Amino acid sequence: MTPADVSTALSGQGYLPDEGISTAVFLAITLHRPLLLEGEAGVGKTELAKALAAVTGGELIRLQCYEGIDVAQAVYDWDYARQLLHLRATEVTGESSTRTADDLETELYGERFLVKRAVLRAIEPTDGPPPVLLIDEIDRADDEFEAYLLEVLSDFQITIPEIGVFSAGRPPLVVLTSNRTRDVHDALKRRCLYHWVEHPDFEREVAIVKLRVPNITDKLARQVAAATENLRELNLYKPPGVAETIDWATALGHLGATTLNEQVVANTLGTVVKYREDSQRVAQHGFGEVVKQAVERALVHGAASGS
């Protein structure tokens, strides 16, 4: 396998990577190292993990991080309701009177009552391809959880005091994403391969739109990509990513649009711009100006590429 093979495989799943992404994924697979992807929201970090799972045939196990997430939500917990029901059942049948408290406690904290969360499920041995563990938006988690995760990613094993050690025979493919709302600690970065995911260049964004919105015309795809590229230069609070470009193109397709015009941009702006302040900034810039610049930019890019 080579980075070119990775690129071909991901493209077959509807994800068009650049050479940097293909190389980073190749090295993560080859070296069995977690891959940390940073970049603005909407550039395709999460979609890469989904495509990677489709390519490898491994289960996609997603852990969505948030402030306050801890081991109970991410790794394992105990099914307290089932434990309580089991205790009551032993009382009704009289079984509890013939057993010691230590025996009952040992039974209650056995694997039968263990709730396996995302990280533990990814660590468990599996007969098929190793799963893809997506740890999404790690920058939203607290420092304490990041420190715990550091230990897990070092050895790919988890110790549960009541049961023992769970260890991965084959490490899962681990993809961590960050929108950089805060800096991820250097210690975690050292455990990972790192790649900053940029917005795609114009031609690749056009290709992505045409792949994900098959019925769109080349003219409209180029105008939408050019308009989105232009919106990213307006200092918006949330610049649109590739996901918004695809949403915009899809919406225009459902409306039967074949080209951008001032009215259609005004009517569909909510598919690509998601904050009131950003909508106002675009309106102040002028919908007509957005269309004009998109048409001009699409023509310039087309001439440069020879299309």
Image (cartoon, rainbow, N blue to C red):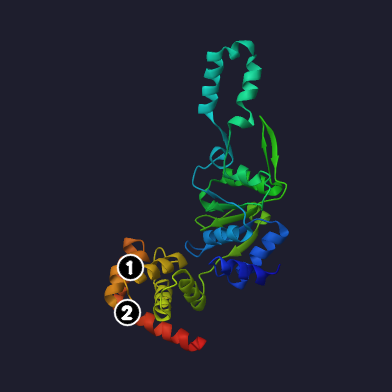
Mark found first going from the N terminus, 2 or 1: 1
SS type, badge 2: helix
Quadrant (top left, top right, bottom left, bottom right) of the N terminus: bottom right
Left/right of residue 116 with respect to residue 214 in the rendered view: right
Q: How many marks?
A: 2
- What residue is shown at x 56% (from left), y 17% (from top)? 90
SS type, badge 1: helix
Q: Is residue 252 above or below residue 155?
A: below
Task: Tell me if I can see residue 284 in this picture.
Answer: no
Residue 307 position in % (x across, y down): 48, 87
**Crowding at mark 2 (Cα within 10 Å: few <14, some 14-19, many 20+):** some
Residue 60 position in % (x across, y down): 57, 52
Residue 90's label in the rendered image is none
Left/right of residue 168 with respect to residue 16 in the rendered view: right
Residue at mark 1: 269
Q: Quadrant of residue 76?
A: top right
Left/right of residue 252 with respect to residue 222 in the rendered view: left
Residue at mark 2: 289
The amino acid type found where label 1 is placed reads Leu
